[in-house]
Amino acid sequence: MLKKKPTFVFLLLLVAFGIKGQENVKLSSFVNPFIGTGAVDQSSLSGSNFPGATVPFGFVQLSPDTQDNPDNPASGYDYNNKTIVGFSHTHLSGTGVSDLFDVLFMPTTGDIKTVPGEAEKPGSGYRSGFSHTQESAKPGYYQVKLLDYNINAELTATEHAGFHRYTFPANSAAHVIIDMNHSLNKKRNYWACKIIGSEIRIVDNKTIEGYRILTGWAKLRKIYFRAEFSKPITSSIMVNGSRVYNNEVIVNGTNIKTALNFDISDGNALLVKVGLSPVSIANAQQNLDKEISGWDFEGVANEAENKWEKELDKIHIDATPEQKQIFYTGLYHAFTQPNNMADVNGDYQATDLTIRNASDKKHYSTFSLWDTYRAAHPLYTILQPERTADFINSMFRQYDTYGYLPIWQLWGDENYCMIGNHAIPVIVDAALKGIKGFDIDKAYEAVKGSSVRSHPGSPFDIWEKYQYMPENQQSQSVSITMEMAYDDWCVAQLAKKLGKTDDYNRFMKRSQFYKNLYDKQSGFFRGKNDDGKWLSPFNPLQYGGNGGNPYTEGNAWQYFWYVPQDVNGLIALVGGDKAFTEKLDTFFSLKDLPGEVNGNASGFIGQYAHGNEPSHHAAYLYDYAGQPWKTQAYVAKVLNELYNNTSSGYSGNEDCGQMSAWYIFSSMGFYPVNPANGVYAIGSPILAKAVIHLAEGKDFTVITKNASPKNVYIQSVKLNGKAYNKAYITHKDITEGGQIEFTMGGKPNTKWGSGMAARPLVSAFN
């Protein structure tokens, strides 16, 4: 992958902080928020991350938008763009679909322009050109010079509020534009966006408030705000469509903007603090009063950085400067969401659109579960056990109103994006690992209920009737069959733990339905109609998207390996270890034919596509068939070639922390192939040392001797000082504390980890 030069500020950081073992350096100094903000090749995917200010798992993400109507990248910011249209207060990190971009502020000088202008045209409308040499970011802080206006804009945030500091040129005509019409692309033909209503009200000469109601990826959203200024508003222009009202106190409609004018002759910066709420203006004010009571911008920024430092401190690593940046930025991205939607008083908008109250003041949303259940949520069980319980209790609330758990929940609203029911493995994994803070009986009720009550994408009556998904009754049938079978295995494991034998047998039987789509002649899982006949013609390289094809964002090659609950059964289905590893060899070497590459797939090694989630576990499957050295080779290749510390640092959408979680686990040397069985397959560690700080003062330490891009093969392993020959460790090995030591070399040791007893377990909880 081509590499783009890091921004100037991070070149300085590399020089200043690149020395190994420098104990007094903050871990937050290694976070580069520009990683994953724009690919060098703009035809490819790269992260879709935003560089702006936020706090861990916070409601507000205050960040620049480089597009008038953001669509791709979904974060609203593209490192390759040349202009900024303004700073909105809510963003998504790494998703494939855009939404949010609420309450946009833009400081300007000179003549007032209240239309956004044309992209990439400085001086057009109120947008401004900018340069990466005059832009910087760190956890909880963002800064940029708006070149058209010579304004230095700085941003920081609390959980529910944004804080702006604008330094205008002396004696300029200073304005702040507030645009309530700024949103995702309103012309797209899926999850269409429409502003239903909005309002801005001038409360007094230092305060405005308002709201907007709109549709989008989340079907119905309400966002309320209250903004307070450090200087008086001297005059204003309210715009509602093409009608202009001078000095009115209120404006409402579906396309409203406001230009506020300020006297900055005292030479001091203009400060703006903005409280947000999904519930009410009164709650937005309460959030603001609670979190930013004064005007200490530096204090708020330092507090935000300290919150990040506390979260990043959960793992300490010894590594190269580049590895530290990728690793800690990965933790930063993983801890950016899910987002706490509850106001400071505990109020939140429930999935049935009523207003309810969480006594613990925690209600999380932004659950990108098709992505994050694979590695991000298992990572949370190690590093965020208390929040894991909070996530699950939040998921229960959708079950209480819908009758099934979240699939892809945004702003507390189910959008039915992607397939499967992957809140199930998240909850089962936490229950089997003994995570405290949620009701295990309620958990079983929810996971079983979500597996028998039919809902969009999950017609369980069809599932149990045919024992596979027929394509003519449910599109994306092969992928759904594979993923439902895994979810059913998870339900069975919790049933077993709770002594529900009949349910265990029922769901274990369903977990084997994947075999009913295996075609021995072609050697792939193929689509069938309800008459039992294979769909033809069949091309295993042909991609599907999100409907109209048996495969979801992948092809038959990429979905072949998706049987994490029964890898041994998959090996037997193919014909044994030799046939299985030969097929894996082909998978990692077979190139696409012309015209067969799909936009959802990137980061290719043969047919392996690291840029999208269905491939993420595949390199570890050699461990299950007696050839762990090949796992080591391919995992090291991904770690060393498909991640870097630049704007093009990811090989695909970051997907709410999943791409980062893969790196965090894999760089330490292990990965949860089955995200709910408590087993981590061993790969190829690249960090010289990693110390995971666990609850109750325990540490789990990973030491890697001779780590280098050439020494990718494990020569020997010690676990707690004793020789260790297994190609896996368990969750218990980690949480009890201790030390694993890898010795690496440049040639495969085909004896290590190759025996039958060394292969990863079906479950660590049996």
Image (cartoon, rainbow, N blue to C red):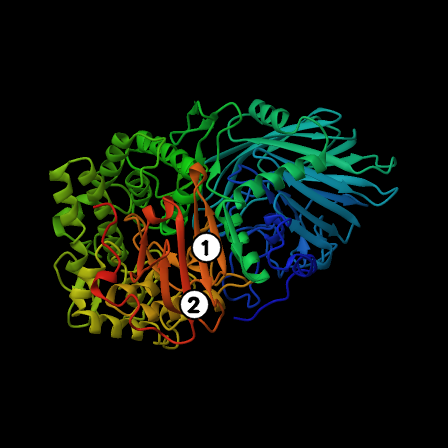
Q: Pointer 2: residues within 10 angstroms few (<14), some, or many (20+)?
A: many
Q: Quarter-wise, where is residue 719 in the image?
A: bottom left
The spot of residue 456 in percent (x, y) is 29, 44
Instruction: Identify residue type, mark 2.
Output: Ala
Residue 436 appears left or right of 301: left
Q: Which mark is residue 664?
A: 1
Vertical placement of 328 versus 439: above or below?
A: below
Q: Quarter-wise, where is residue 618 in the image?
A: bottom left
Q: Is residue 589 visible?
A: yes
Q: Which mark is residue 273?
A: none
Residue 147 appears left or right of 539: right
Q: Quarter-wise, where is residue 353 in the image?
A: top left
Q: Residue at x 42, y 68 (%)?
A: 744
The spot of residue 19 in percent (x, y) is 64, 60
Cα–Cα span, label 2 and label 1: 13 Å
Vertical placement of 471 versus 609: above or below?
A: above
Which comes sooner in the sequence, label 2 or label 1? 2
Residue 672 appears left or right of 203: left
SS at mark 1?
helix
Q: Residue at x 20, y 61 (%)?
A: 568
The answer to whether the residues at label 2 and label 1 have Cβ atoms under 8 Å apart is: no
Instruction: Identify residue type, mark 1.
Output: Ile
Q: Which mark is residue 636?
A: 2
SS at mark 2?
helix
Q: Residue at x 48, y 24 (%)?
A: 346
Q: Is residue 257 visible?
A: no
